[in-house]
Amino acid sequence: MIFKDRAVVFLATGFYAGKLPFAPGTFGSVIGLVLAFLLAGLTLPLALLCMLAIVFFAVWIAQRAEKILKQKDPGCIVIDEIVGMAITLMDLPFNLKTVLLGFALFRILDILKPPPIRTAEKRLTGGIGVVADDVIAGILANILLRITLMVMMQFG
């Protein structure tokens, strides 16, 4: 059981990035870039299917980690930031401009938590509560990133 608990915490904390003494969510988001890069090579239907499976896995891991750590949504759990960052860049070109803009948009939304992100964070509990706000932040960041890229293309 101890090994399983360690494996859960290892994954929930983004390979212990969430245990860093500062900016754990930012480091989790950086790890999310690796996942985004891996998904970028897939067709959209396959990427969506993979992302759906990853979200369910993240919810399960976050739920287990909360119980192991005996805390509600502890800051060291960053699997939600990993997922949110990957959603931010889904079905977009994986290049420096898109990655930097997407990273900034996701972190801003994740930190400020405008509605409906804050609503999800307050109303949902357990693993779904840990992950849902970052999934919503990722979806909103993806939409804002698409708009930003279109405007940038339009105006040079």
Image (spheres, rainbow, N blue to C red):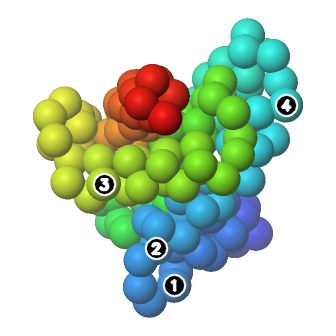
At label 2, which amino acid type do we have? Pro
The answer to whether mark 4 and mark 3 are in CB contact below 8 A is no
SS category of the residue bearing label 4: loop
Instruction: Tell me the residue that label 4 is attached to.
Output: 41
Instruction: Tell me the residue that label 2 is attached to.
Output: 24
The answer to whether mark 3 and mark 2 are in CB contact below 8 A is no
At label 3, which amino acid type do we have? Ile
SS category of the residue bearing label 2: helix
Classify 10 Å Cα crowding around label 3: few (below 14), some (14-19), many (20 and above): some
The N terminus - image quarter: bottom right
Residue 85 makes an appearance in the image: yes
Residue 45 horizontal/vertical position (percent): 73, 10
Instruction: Tell me the residue that label 1 is attached to.
Output: 20
Instruction: Tell me the residue that label 3 is attached to.
Output: 108
Q: Earlier in the sequence, mark 1 or mark 3?
A: 1
The answer to whether mark 2 and mark 1 are in CB contact below 8 A is yes
As drawn, the residue found furthest toward the front would be 156
Disc 2 to disc 4, C-alpha distance: 27 Å
